[in-house]
Image (cartoon, grey):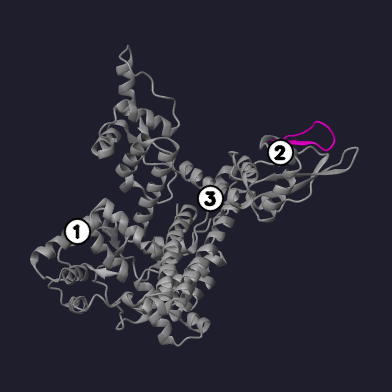
Amino acid sequence: MLVTITRPGLVRLGLCKLPPFISRVSLTEASNQKKKKKKMTVTNSGIQYAVQIITKHFGNLVAKVCETLLKSGPLNLGALIRSTALTPQQVKNSLLILVQHNCVQPFTQESKAGLKVQYMAVYDNILHRLRFAKFLAVVAQELDDDCKQLLAGLLEHGRLTQQQLMDRANQKSKSNSSQVQNAAQDNFIRLVTARFVERCPAPEPLLEEAPEQEGPKKPRSKSAKMAQVSETIEQRVLAAARPMEAIRFLITTNPETDDPSQKSENNSSSMSVGEKRKFDDLDIGEHGSNDKEVILWRANFEQFIRCLRHKACVENVRARHDDGAAVVLRAVLKATRMQETKVKTDYSVPLKMGAIYNEVIDSAAGRNLTKVSVKASLHLLCGAPPVRGGYEGEGEDEDEDEDEDVPYSIDLKKIIELLQNDEVESIVLKRYGQDACRIFRLLTSQSKPAGQFFETDKISVDALVDKKETPKILYKLWKDDYVHMEKLSLTTAKQSQVMVWKVHKSIVWEHVLDEMYHAAYNLVKRYDHEREENKEVTNTPKEKRVGELEKKANRFLGVRKIMALSLVKLDDALMLFHDF
């Protein structure tokens, strides 16, 4: 940092080291940020929110097992029984339900006593249970309502075989005709082709030891150290359980034929699909061995989150620029969706101009866009210089030929960061006012992730805030963990201290996410309280709701609608910081 002393007590901060006559009193989080790249972890509020979801869907016993796994990490069956103080059968049944609904992933790990099966809660999949309506809306928009109905069965039951999906379609249509069967089969193929449905992961994958570096350690550059982020055990387990890409979306014709080992499969497929499937005949220690030949399918949450992330990026571009840029971005993301290897990708897959333009004019909203306007939107989205030309002239054809061969890649990470900035700024604006929002925007407008230090007087001048009010506002933001403060001691002729401020985005973002978890937990809890308080009203038939009962019923319906909409918007913000 560059510190310029213009007069005693006035400090201006830049970009090089402090001179020897200035010492830093407190370092706190700043030094920790430089040591390692911190990843957002699941907080206590997040765990409470997840446990509440499980309690609402499966009851207290299952929620107790899930809470123990979320707080303690992966455990084997014996340790889980001791921690929960439940009977072995209760723990086994709870695990079967959680595995069936993709909330727990078993895996095998080598120990001194040999191979042991451990159970790990999949936190993201638990939160996804409140997003089923969004997932169904995505399928209805991308495909049609028939595919939506077929997917609803998988979301309801967690995991089903292809035959059980066909049987459920027959039950819903109240017909067993070959036409209904063929239509359901075609819709299933469309869901798998669009990667909305995938094969279930391996039941108990072997988790290998994390690779250790052998030999003397070689010195690495600072950028290499920052780029190296060790995988968590959850990421390693999910990667080991995920099927190979060659078979993950592979559909076999008539998977339940002629094989005598699958008679139990056919028997289970004939059961009522309205009941939650429980594999009572499976041993909890080796539940994957008996159904080795059975192909189970589940909803591919990763693809749904990718679609919702793309939609958020498109809507943000529409709000910041225009409809044309949004149409172009949607076309690029749609054309390259299958080629994305992870959800949180920083840049879109590179695509040439010709492929982009063909995708744009294939959509109803982009049929009237010219190639010149598409190029202008691409240059705007990619941060390139504006498109040249527009009239006939010398060298124009050569420029167009060059543009045809240039691949375009759009910075999606920047779009998401702008959305996150807007969300946090809206929170600061509502809580602390317009002046605080301007100060916070100034501190977060720096290019560095850890921000840049500003002295109090400089903040007052740059943010156009009264000099007397600035320290008060900064203190409020610092007290609520929205800004970071350090004191600089000036060892000049006159001993004095100067307070400097900045925003650690990663720390503030994690704090905001924790507040959102807490708000969502309270919102669901309040909704359950309102429903319990108005149980008598809701159980009364509509025709008998007169007078005071009718007023209570109308009030409850209004409150329920507001809470439901609030939870949907809050979940959108949660996805923005946790999933996107």
Instruction: Please say if the residues under marks 3 and 1 sit with CB atoms less than 8 Å apart.
Output: no
Q: Residue at x 35, y 58 (%)?
A: 134
Q: Earlier in the sequence, mark 2 or mark 1?
A: 1
**Residue 311 visible in rendering:** yes
Amino acid identity at mark 2: Ser
The disc placed on residue 228 is 3
Which residue was labeled with disc 2? 460
> Majority secondary structure of the magenta segment?
loop
The secondary structure type at the circle numbered 3 is: loop
Residue 253 belongs to the span the image colors magenta: no
Which residue was labeled with disc 1? 187
| Image position of 294 (left or right of 434) | left
Q: Are there few (<14), some (14-19), or many (20+) residues within 10 Å of tag 3?
A: few
**Residue 208 visible in rendering:** no
Determine the residue located farthest toward the right in the rendered image: 493
Amino acid identity at mark 1: Asn
Q: Quadrant of the N terminus?
A: top right
- In the rendered image, residue 89, in percent from the top left (x then y), is placed at 40, 86
- In the rendered image, residue 60, in percent from the top left (x then y), is placed at 45, 80
The secondary structure type at the circle numbered 2 is: helix
Q: What's the distance in space between the residues labelled 2 and 1, CA to CA?
A: 61 Å
Q: What's the distance in space between the residues labelled 3 and 2, CA to CA?
A: 39 Å
Q: Residue at x 71, y 38 (%)?
A: 460
Q: Nearer the viewer's eye, disc 3 or disc 2?
A: 2
Q: Residue at x 37, y 47 (%)?
A: 311
Q: Earlier in the sequence, mark 3 or mark 2?
A: 3
- In the rendered image, residue 395, in percent from the top left (x then y), is placed at 33, 14
Q: Specify the segment rendered in magenta.
A: 1-15
The secondary structure type at the circle numbered 1 is: helix
| The image quarter in which residue 454 lies | top right
